[in-house]
């Protein structure tokens, strides 16, 4: 497919990299020539130095020949206008990034009026994942997620003591005809192999046929959907802080926002109900102690600076806060945070890129998908004739460590695979992949047959 990305910022480049893994024809347009040169030196993509708000620029590249336009500039209004213009000029589908809270309640109106096919909001996306983690007891809604003939369950290992201190290769007798496809440890999702050791404080994601999974669910799941969370401190009153405070307050949680900018504090206090807004510098640990950080059920660090979020999250954990979540945009920082005991690090770029990719794929490849703790995605695809993964034992595919074939639905049969299992045409394949491996995932489900694809990530 031909895809135009307008805006060579972090999101635009992230989406482009993922799409290139799927063998799409990707062009990036931006008004900053120097930025385009840097992008062109990093990834193999065509660049156009032009202003997409000018219809002449869109017509010069024959926008009517494009399957998708994705507007990711730093301005909501520009993204809406660019997407609308492109659709009017004949582009098949258009996507716009819109972040302003004032637009949130009128997304449907904007889409209908401006003829935009999809709107993505990174701050709203990360808010939903944080909310599911700290408020909803289970990340999979009612505890079971079903796709095709296979079902997935997530539960705390201490509810199933037989698994404690067992390697994944050893759990077969305790989970017959089921497979551990992910482990959550200190808020970090791990795609396991046979040597992965399951620890007492882990949560595991187990897939199998619906009936045995339902029987397991009855044994290991606690009753009730929600936690007893009462107090949450949000550090950073930006868009993520705003959306999260709004959602938590509506649920009945006592929310306290700490924001450095007086002007932003005024906005928050006039647009949020039943939320305490404090003007102060959260890196002043004395301030947080005065505001009883140690009494909080959860602390979310959502400033605009990854380094501050890392420092503040570590400080919250030092005060024995039960749930500590940090917003980070650099993949390397997410690794550092989880390795140091922070409960969860979420990257809004990964979450938004996943949403865009799934919209582009649509029904043709991906039948359904579900995010897991904002870090991994489980999806069901149809195996098509030109996929490189067909008719080979899984152990010979050289899949990256961040990806796992979880189940195969063939006719009326559900297959929990092993290394000798082969995927054949028309199988419905359930796979799990880390969001950081989106480009590899795209290569895996690519069925264009236009070029060879190396499943190993480049270092």
Image (cartoon, helix red, strand yellow):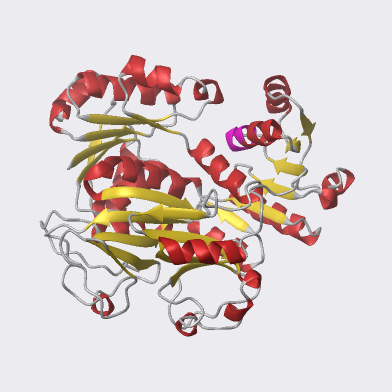
Q: Is residue 98 left or right of residue 256?
A: left
Residue extending farthest top? 113
Q: Residue at x 81, y 58 (%)?
A: 319
From the viewer's perspective, tell me whether residue 293 is left or right of residue 350: right
Residue 405, position in %: x, y? Answer: 33, 67
Q: Would residue 244 be counted in the magenta stretch?
A: no
* Residue 439: quadrant of the picture: bottom left
Q: Quadrant of residue 51?
A: top left
- Rendering coords of residue 236 (x, y %): 67, 39
Q: Is residue 325 left or right of residue 192?
A: right
Image quadrant containing the C terminus: bottom left
Q: Residue 305: x, y in percent?
A: 60, 46
Q: Is residue 242 magenta?
A: yes
Give the prevailing secondary structure in the magenta stretch: helix
- Farthest-out residue, right: 290
Residue 311 position (above or below residue 354): below
> Going 44% across and 77% down the picture, which residue do you hit?
176
Residue 162 x/y as whole percent: 60, 80
Q: Residue 62's quadrant in the figure? A: top left
The residue stretch that appears in magenta: 239-243
Q: Is residue 38 visible?
A: no
232 over 164 or under it: above or below: above
Is residue 12 or residue 242 the one in the foreground? 242
Q: Is residue 52 above or below residue 46?
A: above
Nearer to me, 20 or 412: 412
Q: What residue lies at 66% left-to-right and 58% top-to-bottom?
A: 222
Q: Examine the rendering and report whether any part of residue 329 can be seen.
A: yes
Residue, x 28% and y 53% (percent of image)? Answer: 43
């Amino acid at each position: 497919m031909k895809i135009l990305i307008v805006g060579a910022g972090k999101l635009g480049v992230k989406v482009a990299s993922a799409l290139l893994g799927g063998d799409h024809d990707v062009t990036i347009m931006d008004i900053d020539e120097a930025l385009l040169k840097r992008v062109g030196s990093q990834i193999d993509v065509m660049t156009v130095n032009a202003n997409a708000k000018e219809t002449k620029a869109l017509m010069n590249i024959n926008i009517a020949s494009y399957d998708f336009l994705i507007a990711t500039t730093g301005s909501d209004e520009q993204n809406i206008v660019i997407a609308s213009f492109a659709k009017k000029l004949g582009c098949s589908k258009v996507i716009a990034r819109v972040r302003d809270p004032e637009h949130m309640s009128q997304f449907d109106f904007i889409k209908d009026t401006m003829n935009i096919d999809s709107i993505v909001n990174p701050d709203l996306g990360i808010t939903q994942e944080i909310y599911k983690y700290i408020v909803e007891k289970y990340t999979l809604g009612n505890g079971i997620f079903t796709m095709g003939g296979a079902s997935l369950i997530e539960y705390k290992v201490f509810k199933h003591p037989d698994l404690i201190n067992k390697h994944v290769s050893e759990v077969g007798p305790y989970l017959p005809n089921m497979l551990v496809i992910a482990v959550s440890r200190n808020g970090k999702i791990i795609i396991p192999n046979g040597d992965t050791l399951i620890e007492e404080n882990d949560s595991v994601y187990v897939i199998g046929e619906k009936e045995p999974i339902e029987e397991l669910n009855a044994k290991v799941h606690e009753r009730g959907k929600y936690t007893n969370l009462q107090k949450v401190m949000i550090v950073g009153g930006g868009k993520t802080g705003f959306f999260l405070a709004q959602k938590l307050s509506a649920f009945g949680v006592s929310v306290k926002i700490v924001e450095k900018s007086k002007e932003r504090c005024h906005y928050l206090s006039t647009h949020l109900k039943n939320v305490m807004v404090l003007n102060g510098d959260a890196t002043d640990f004395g301030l947080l102690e005065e505001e009883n950080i140690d009494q909080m059920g959860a602390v979310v660090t959502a400033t605009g600076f990854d380094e501050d979020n890392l420092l503040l999250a570590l400080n919250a954990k030092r005060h024995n806060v039960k749930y500590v979540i940090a917003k980070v945009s650099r993949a390397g920082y997410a690794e550092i945070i989880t390795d140091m005991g922070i409960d969860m690090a979420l990257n809004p770029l990964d979450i938004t890129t996943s949403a865009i990719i799934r919209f582009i794929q649509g029904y043709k490849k991906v039948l359904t998908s579900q995010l897991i703790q904002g870090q991994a995605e489980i999806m069901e695809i149809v195996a098509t004739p030109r996929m490189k993964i067909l008719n080979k034992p899984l152990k010979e595919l050289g899949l990256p460590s961040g990806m796992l074939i979880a189940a195969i639905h063939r006719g009326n049969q559900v297959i929990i695979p092993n290394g000798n299992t082969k995927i054949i045409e028309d199988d419905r394949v359930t796979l799990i992949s880390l969001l950081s491996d989106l480009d590899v995932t795209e290569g895996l489900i690519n069925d264009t047959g236009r070029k060879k694809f190396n499943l190993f990530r480049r270092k």
